[in-house]
Image (spheres, helix red, strand yellow):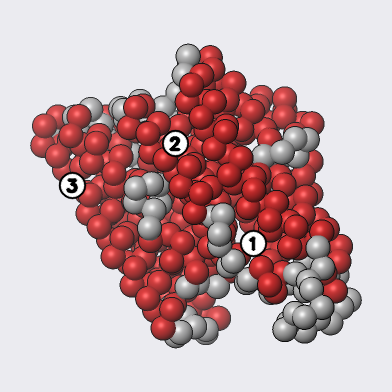
Amino acid sequence: MNPQAKLIFALSLTLGTTLTISSNHWIMAWTGLEINTLAILPLISKSHHPRAIEAATKYFLVQAAASTLVLFSSMTNAWHTGQWDITQLSHPTSCLILTVALAMKLGLVPFHFWFPEVLQGSSLIVGLLLSTLMKFPPITLLYLTSPSLKPSVLMTMAILSTALGGWMGLNQTQTRKILAFSSISHLGWMAIIIAYSPKLALLNFYLYTLMTAAVFLSLNSIKALKLSTLMTTWTKAPSLNAILLLTLLSLAGLPPLTGFLPKWLIIQELTKQEVALAATIIALLSLLGLFFYLRLAYCATITLPPHTTNHMKQWYNNKPTNTMVAVLTTKSLMLLPISPIILAVV
C-alpha cells in the first residue's frame, strides 16, 4: 500500500478515536466511530484476497448496523429527555439499545460471530488494531454511560462471552482465531465489572491491550499464522519463543505475571459487591481460556513437531528483536509487583 495512503488512514484512526473519547455530545461520538470504521476498511482489504474482501464487508455491515443503533438510542433519549449529553442517558429503552449497539461494536456474545471471521481475514498487524485500538472508543462509551446501564444485562453478556470465548477457542488451529476468541473472553471480564467499578474495567482494558500487542507483534516477528507453523519457529527465534510462552501465560492470568492483576482485582470487587456467585462462575470459565493458551505455549516452545512433519524448519534469525516487542513483553510479565503504584495512579 502507498505510504501516503497508510499515513492518511493512520491519522484518520487517531482522529476518530480521539473524537469519540473526548466528546460529550452523541453526534460527535457517532462521527468518531464512523471515521474509525471507514479508516480501517482499506487496511483490512488491502491484500485483495477474497478472504480479506469478505472480512472487510462483514466488518462494514456489522459496524454500520451498530452505529445506526447508537444514533437511534441517542435520538430516542433526546426525544424523551431533551438531552444530547452522553452522561445523561436515562431513558430505559435507549439504555437497552445502546447496550446492544456497544456489544455489537465490541464483539460481546451474542453479537460476536463477526469478530473471529474478520480477524482471520486480516493480517496480524490489522488484527492487532481491531483487537485493541478499535475497541477503545466503544469501551469509553460504556465507561461514560455505565451508571445508566443494567448490571444484570451486562453480567449475562459477560458470563456468556467468557464461556463461549473459552469454549470456541479450544479446537482452533489458526492463531488469529485463537486470539479473537481470547479477546471475546477478556471483554467478558471488562463487561462484568464496568457497572460496579468503571475504572477497574479501563485498567483491565489497558493491561489486556499491552499483553495482546506483545503476543500479536511476537507472532508477526516469527510469521506464525497456524499452530503447525508455530511448532517450527523455535529454530528461527528461540529467545522470542521462550518469552512468548510467558506472555501467553500472562494473558491467561497466571500469577506472578501482569495478567493476574486485573482478574484478582475484578474478583475482589465482585465479592465486595456481593455477587460472589458471578465471580466464581467467571473465574471457573477462565480455565477454558487457560487451556488454549497452554496449547499455544505448548506448540510454541515445549514440544518439537514429529519427524514426519511436512513443514520445513525455518532459518535461524540473527536480527535483534524489535524494541517494541521487547518493551511490551517485559511489561506483560513484570507489572504485578508494582500493582500498588498502578492502583494509586488509576
Q: Give the residue pinned by disc 3.
A: 72
Look at the picture and state if 44 lies above or below 28. below
Q: Give the residue pinned by disc 2.
A: 159
Q: Residue at x 53, y 14 (%)?
A: 272
- Confirm whether residue 233 shows in the render: no
Q: Decide if residue 328 is on the left or right side of residue 235.
A: left
Look at the picture and state if 271 lies above or below 243. above
Q: Residues within 10 Å of mark 1 (few under 14, many from 20)?
A: many
Q: Nearer the viewer, mark 2 or mark 1?
A: 2
Residue 277 x %, y %: 48, 21
Which residue occupies the foreground of this view, 118 or 26?
118
Q: Residue at x 24, y 36 (%)?
A: 96
Report the Cα–Cα distance between label 2 and label 3.
27 Å
Q: Give the residue pinned by disc 1.
A: 216
**In the rendering, which numbered label is found on residue 80?**
none
Which residue occupies the foreground of this view, 129 or 281?
281
Q: Residues within 10 Å of mark 2 (few under 14, many from 20)?
A: many
Mark 3 belongs to which amino acid? Phe
Report the Cα–Cα distance between label 2 and label 1.
25 Å
